[in-house]
Image (tube, rainbow, N blue to C red):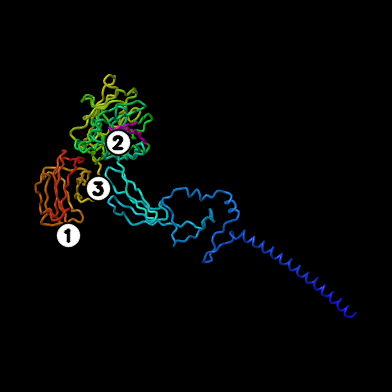
Amino acid sequence: MANDAKNEKKQKIDKDFIEEENNGKFILVIILSILVVLALIIGSVYYFNKDTEEPEKENNKPVEVIDDQDLEEDENEEPEIEEKEESTSVFEEIIADNQTTEDTNEENPNEGGEVPVEITYTVKYLNASNEQIGEDQLVKDLSDAIEPAVPEKEGYKGTWTGMCDNETNVCTYTPKYEKIIVTMSEGSTYNINLNGNVIEATGLVIENGTRDENGNRSYIEIKFIAPDEITKEMVEEMKLTITTEGVDGGITENGITILDSTKEEIEEEIFYFNYTVAVDNTEDLVLPEIAIDWGNGVESKYTIDINGIEIQSYAEYIGITKPTVDDANKEGTLTGAGDVTYDINAELDSNEGNVTKIIVEGEVNNYENKTGIMEVVGLDKYNNILTIKFTAPENITDFTNLKVITEQNTYEGPGLLDGENYFFMYQAVDPGTTSNPRIIIDWDGDSGELKPETYVINTDTIKLTPTEELKNTVSSTEESTYNQNLIQNHEGENIIEVTGEIKYNEENKGYLIETTFKPVEGTFVVEDKITVTDKDGKNIYEKENLIIDSEGHFSYSHTEQVENTNSSPGITIDWNGGETQGGEITYNYDISNVELVPTT
């Protein structure tokens, strides 16, 4: 019984142990299952998020993180990288083994695992002889390269053209030349540029002094040059057509007849011609269209653009301000320029066929550049420009038959007018000329009722405006009743202006001017070499007239006898006899304003 009880108790313990063991196994299984599930969840999370974690470089510096949302959007859209691959660049970008990059491919971070490398280009410029111009340029972008000037080639326009080596990233530029076939005439102040088939004229055009029959004063001259392949045989078949306002103008066949090329140039097959176009700023101005077939069967058509042209008036060109002040005593007829120091007056001389004398008093501006480009009456003979405004009588409103006659030319038509009823005359004069300019104006022409008016310009009282007043090296004695002042005129002449009264000298039987001359500061003086000559070249030096003061300064006293004539005396002093330059100086007297006082 005891054993039975013991066995029963053992069986019960064993059963409990088994039950407990089974329960522990069950709990362990549950725990292991939970761990497996957790591992799977963590693994899944890690798997799906591993690409969005912040990658690190070898140096542990962070790089840009790509947002999940942007990635999802990119996955649903066609990557832009494919479009970039379709575009053509200057050359392929190659990633070298030893090159690194700091930027990830933001467009498609998972594609290929490669990123573009920044490339440095070596840029070279070569001339036509394959010689390098300047130093190599290293640039990240070819647009940053600084182009030097293209070497000039006469008659051609040059541009740079480049080639790039994809392996070395070296880009070489060489000049490419295009023959100039449209340009400006020689000596022009404007520029001509051919843009497609449009001839663009820009710059300054100086108007002509007179108008043509259409009232134009301003012109450009275009030079048309044949291409290189044109031969003499082709030019003989050349055709030129000028079209204005939609109407065909003259057609010229056989281009030899219109060429401005010389005979020598034609033999060398250099063909060109000039065409003049009016460019006045008038509302009704119509520019022509030009069509050229140089004989090769190819017609080139050109239009003209003058929006970039600036026109300078003739008066401005020669430095004259148009008259603005009406100071004539013959109402409204004659006007002097408002910014000069001369006055214009008029008087009718009944003794000379009712000629109107134009009296000019004061200084007249000097015009140094006698180019002759524009017409000034008498410009080929005289230097000083006188500006006169002529205004028509009140009853004249039709200027169809207007005629102006000068000593050189005859001008006709309303194109002469500068305003509604007036025109400007630019007359070249010199002081005291014996032949005074004459102008005839017929306001209504030969068939009109008004008689032509004749004007004569009196130059006796005209004085030249000095360009420079020199340091005075001449003087008079204190007792003198006259003054002497030294100026230099536009011709570089030294003029001694004498003003005031000169009293008659009984002892010397004449009117005397006594002048003391000093050498210009810095002049090297050699006492034994000093010479003084008169206007005729005669030596009139008198040693007793040489003065040396206590400080060693030289001066020379000279007495000149004058009469009341237009003949001006003059002398030349050479302070060193040619030992050094600058010692010789010539003086001419101006005694036109001297009053000679006889003995009472």
What segment carries the magenta color?
289-306
**Residue 290 is a magenta residue:** yes
Q: Earlier in the sequence, mark 3 or mark 1?
A: 3
Nearest the camera: 446 or 6? Answer: 6
Residue 229: quadrant of the picture: top left
Residue most toward the left?
538
Q: Is residue 578 left or right of residue 88?
A: left
Cα separation between marks 3 and 1: 27 Å
Query: Which mark identifies residue 31?
Result: none
Please give the residue where the numbered disc 2 appears in the rendered image: 222
Which residue, given by chain and number where applicable, does mark 1 sit on? 552
Between 499 and 379, the residue placed more toward the observer is 379
At label 1, the amino acid type is: Gly
> Which residue is the extreme one toward the right?
1
Q: Nearer the viewer, residue 587 or 548?
A: 587
User: Which of the two discs, 3 and 2, labels the residue nearer the N terminus?
Assistant: 2
Asked which secondary structure carries label 2, the reply is strand
**For the residue marked with disc 3, what is the amino acid?**
Glu
Instruction: Determine which of the numbered discs, if any, sits on residue 469 in the image.
Output: 3
**Quarter in which the C terminus is drawn:** top left
Residue 348 appears in view: no
Give the structural element (helix, strand or loop) at label 3: strand
Q: Position of residue 343 (x, y in %)?
A: 28, 36
- Asked if residue 23 lies in the magenta stretch, the reply is no
